[in-house]
Image (spheres, grey):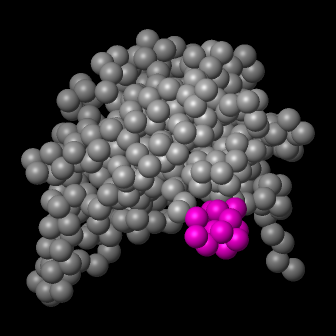
C-alpha cells in the first residue's frame, strides 16, 4: 500500500495566492463587467529588459547550431553568470565569494522551500510573523510543524511577531531555535532592518549554532543608506547564514525563472554527535541529485542584466515600480489609514480600516472598488488586521486603483 506523507493533510486549505485567485475568479464569473485591478500577488507586469531579450534570442540561436548547442549544464550554474553575480551583487558591498559558493537556480520560492531538506527534521524553526507562507508550509510538509492551534500557530514553530507595535523589527527568540527565516526587505510588510539590528541576529546565530535563512529577493528596492544589501555585510555572517536572491523582482524573471542561493563554505551545520559539517557540500549534493541546472538560455538572459544596458534598464524598471509604491503609500496615507513599507520595498502594508479583519477588507475592496490585494492574515496570525498592496501593477492601473481607493476611504 502506498502511504502518503500525512504532513500534507495538516496543511489548511490551499496556498494563499491560489485561494486569492479562486476568490477573484468567482467574483469575476458573477460580475463579468467589473474592471478588476490586481495588486495582490507580487508578480511583475513590465516586459523583460531589452538587453535580456536580445541575449535570450542569441542563446536560442546558439541552441539551433550543432557547434554551439548545449545539453546538460553544470547543476550549480554556469561560471559566466556566477562571476557576474559576485562582481556586481556582492563585491561592491565588500563581500567576497568563491564561484562554488553561489548556486544558480530556478527561483527563490523553490530554494527557500527546498533548503530545509539538508537539515534534520528535529530542528526547531523560527519565523517572523507575518511571513512569506512558503517557509512555513514547506516545513509543515517536512514534519517540523506539530499541530495547528486555534490561534493559527503551529505548535512546534516559534513565531516572532513583527507589528506596528515593535516597528516591524524582529526580537530575538527566548525559546531554543535551530533555523531562522529572515526576509529583508520584508515580504509582506515592506519594512527593513538596519545593519546594527541585523548584527544582533548574526551574533545570536553564532552564539547558539543557529542558521539564518536570509531571503533578500527584494534587495534591489533598497533606497536607504543603512539598510544591508546582503547579510554577509555583517561580520561573521558567512559562518551562520545562507542567502537567497532572485532575478524575478529586479529584472522581471517571474515567468522566466532564475535565482541564486549563496552557501558559504564556512557555514556549518552539526551532526547529532556535534561534528561540524559544511552546508555548502550538502546543498551541492542535493542540487546535483535533484536539479539539472537552470536552462542555458535563461542564464544567458540573466547575464545580460549585468551589462551596462541591462543595469540601466533594470534601474528604470525598479524606478517604475517604486513610483507606484510611492503613489500607493501616499494615497492610502491621505485617507488617514496607517501605512508602512513602500520605501525600500515594492510592498505597502496597511492597517485595515474600521477594525475590519483582513479577509473582510479583502472582500470589501474586491466587491466595492474591484481591487485585489492580499489579506495580512494569509501571512500569519500577526498579519491579522493588516493588508498588503503590491507596487508591481502597471502605472495606469495603480493610478486608477488609488483614485478608487481614496474616493472610497477618504475620511
Ligand atoms: C508574493 O506575492 O508574495 C510573491 O509573489 C511571492 C513570490 O515571489 O512567490
Residue 355 location (% of width, % of height): 76, 29
Is 344 above or below relative to 145?
A: above
Magenta span: chief secondary structure: helix
Up-down: is 186 above or below 296? above
Q: Residue at x 50, y 26 (%)?
A: 334
**In this picture, residue 316 sits left or right of residue 284:** left
Judging depth in this view, the residue of 89 and 256 nearest the camera is: 256
- Residue 325 percent location from the top left of the image: 41, 37
Percent x, y for residue 132? Answer: 59, 43
Q: Quadrant of residue 298?
A: bottom left
Is 3 drawn above or below residue 324 in the view shown? Answer: below
The C terminus, quarter of image: top right
- Residue located at (27% from left, 48% from top): 317
Q: Is residue 134 visible?
A: no
Q: Is residue 155 magenta?
A: no
**Image quadrant assignment for residue 230:** top left
Can residue 335 be seen at all in this image of the molecule?
A: yes
**Depth check: 45 or 65 in front?**
45
Q: How many marks?
A: 0
**Residue drawn at 40 percent across, 28 percent down:** 343
Given the current orientation, which residue lies at the most extreme right position? 150
Please identify the quarter of the rendering in which residue 231 is found: top left
Toward the viewer: 192 or 297?
A: 192
Pick the quarter of the image with the N terminus. Answer: bottom right
The residue that appears at 37% across and 22% down in the rendered structure is 227
What stretch of residues is rendered in magenta? 21-34
Q: Determine whether, in the image, residue 181 is placed left or right of residue 221.
A: right
x, y percent for residue 177 = 69, 27
Amino acid at each position: 500500500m502506498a502511504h502518503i506523507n500525512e504532513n500534507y493533510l495538516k496543511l489548511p486549505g490551499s496556498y494563499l495566492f491560489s485561494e486569492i485567485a479562486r476568490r477573484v475568479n468567482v467574483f469575476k464569473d458573477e460580475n463579468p463587467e467589473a474592471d478588476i485591478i490586481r495588486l495582490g500577488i507580487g508578480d511583475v507586469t513590465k516586459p523583460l529588459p531589452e538587453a535580456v531579450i536580445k541575449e535570450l534570442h542569441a542563446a536560442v540561436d546558439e541552441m539551433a547550431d550543432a557547434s554551439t548547442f548545449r545539453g546538460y549544464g553544470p547543476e550549480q550554474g554556469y561560471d559566466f553568470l556566477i562571476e557576474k553575480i559576485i562582481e556586481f551583487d556582492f563585491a561592491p558591498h565588500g563581500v567576497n565569494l568563491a564561484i562554488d559558493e553561489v548556486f544558480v537556480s530556478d527561483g527563490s520560492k523553490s530554494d527557500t522551500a527546498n533548503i530545509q531538506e539538508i537539515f534534520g527534521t528535529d530542528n526547531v524553526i523560527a519565523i517572523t510573523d507575518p511571513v512569506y507562507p512558503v517557509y512555513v508550509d514547506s516545513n509543515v510538509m517536512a514534519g517540523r510543524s506539530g499541530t495547528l492551534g486555534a490561534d493559527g500557530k503551529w505548535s512546534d514553530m516559534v513565531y516572532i511577531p513583527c507589528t506596528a507595535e515593535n516597528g516591524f523589527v524582529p526580537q530575538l527568540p527566548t525559546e531554543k531555535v535551530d533555523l531562522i527565516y529572515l526576509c529583508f526587505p520584508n515580504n509582506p510588510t515592506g519594512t527593513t532592518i538596519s545593519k546594527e539590528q541585523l548584527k544582533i541576529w548574526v551574533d545570536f546565530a553564532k552564539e547558539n549554532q543557529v542558521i539564518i535563512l536570509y531571503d533578500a529577493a527584494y534587495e534591489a528596492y533598497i533606497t536607504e543608506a543603512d539598510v544591508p544589501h546582503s547579510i554577509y555585510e555583517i561580520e561573521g555572517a558567512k559562518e551562520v547564514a545562507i542567502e537567497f536572491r532572485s532575478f524575478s523582482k529586479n529584472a522581471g524573471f517571474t515567468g522566466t525563472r532564475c535565482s541564486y542561493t549563496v552557501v558559504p563554505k564556512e557555514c556549518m551545520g552539526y551532526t547529532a554527535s556535534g561534528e561540524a559539517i559544511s552546508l555548502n557540500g550538502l546543498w551541492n549534493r542535493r542540487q546535483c541529485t535533484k536539479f539539472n541546472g537552470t536552462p542555458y538560455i535563461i542564464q544567458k538572459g540573466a547575464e545580460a542584466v549585468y551589462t551596462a544596458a541591462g543595469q540601466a534598464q533594470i534601474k528604470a524598471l525598479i524606478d517604475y515600480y517604486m513610483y507606484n509604491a510611492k503613489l500607493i503609500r501616499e494615497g492610502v496615507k491621505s485617507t488617514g489609514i496607517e501605512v508602512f513599507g513602500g520605501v525600500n520595498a515594492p510592498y505597502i502594508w496597511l492597517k485595515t480600516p474600521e477594525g475590519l479583519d483582513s479577509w473582510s477588507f479583502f472582500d470589501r475592496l474586491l466587491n466595492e472598488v474591484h481591487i485585489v490585494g492580499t489579506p495580512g492574515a494569509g501571512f500569519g496570525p500577526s498579519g491579522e488586521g493588516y493588508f498588503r498592496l503590491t507596487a508591481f501593477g502597471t502605472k495606469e492601473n495603480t493610478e486608477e486603483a488609488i483614485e478608487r481607493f481614496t474616493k472610497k476611504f477618504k475620511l
